[in-house]
Amino acid sequence: MLEGGGIRVLIFPRPLLAEILITLGWSIVAFGARDVLSTFASVQVLWMDKPAGLDCTKAARVIAAAIGYTYAAGAIVFLLNLVLIMATISEVVSSGLTEYFGARVASAILSLAYPILISEGILRTLKHRLATAQSDAT
């Protein structure tokens, strides 16, 4: 395991939640709540054949856009973390390197890793599986 706490040291809930919410928000603005929520049903396609009533083409289009939104959300969260680091740098210089500062730097670095894991590990896999389900249906 990782020294000092296992896998939990790699999870920072705030940046991860911010990236997920930004992606969902932009997807809802672009496609509407109904299409985004019905796309969540497409997650079933990872474990089974095409779910009944699912438009694979539309779901794949929503997911393709969500991949880009996830990367953009990661960039925004990374920049916000950098701003927070710069805002506290004078306190760190005067008091020495603190655990809070180290956690902020780690959070900034991981905010670049989360979009890769979400986009490539989940969303792109789901998009390819939907394309396969669509081609199998025709």
Image (cartoon, rainbow, N blue to C red):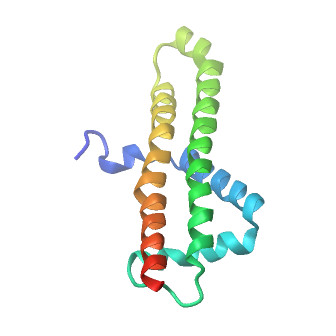
Q: Residue at x 57, y 33 (%)?
A: 78
Q: Residue at x 48, y 53 (%)?
A: 119
Indicate whether 127 appears above or below 15.
below
Indicate whether 85 appears above or below 112.
above
Indicate the position of residue 118 as horizontal and vertical percent values: 47, 54
**In front of the other: 127 or 87:** 127
Indicate the position of residue 22 as horizontal and vertical percent values: 67, 51
> Which residue ends up furthest to the front in the rendered image?
138
The answer to which quarter of the image holds residue 27 is bottom right
> Which residue ends up furthest to the bottom in the rendered image?
52
Counting every numbered tag in the picture gives 0
> Which residue ends up furthest to the top in the rendered image?
94
**In front of the other: 46 or 137:** 137
Q: Is residue 86 left or right of residue 5?
A: right
Indicate whether 135 appears above or below 87.
below
**In front of the other: 47 or 131:** 131
Q: Residue at x 45, y 77 (%)?
A: 135
The answer to which quarter of the image holds residue 58 is bottom right
Q: Is residue 9 left or right of residue 82?
A: left
Q: Is residue 98 left or right of residue 85?
A: left
Indicate whether 125 appears above or below 98.
below
Q: Residue at x 49, y 60 (%)?
A: 123
Indicate the position of residue 61 as horizontal and vertical percent values: 61, 64
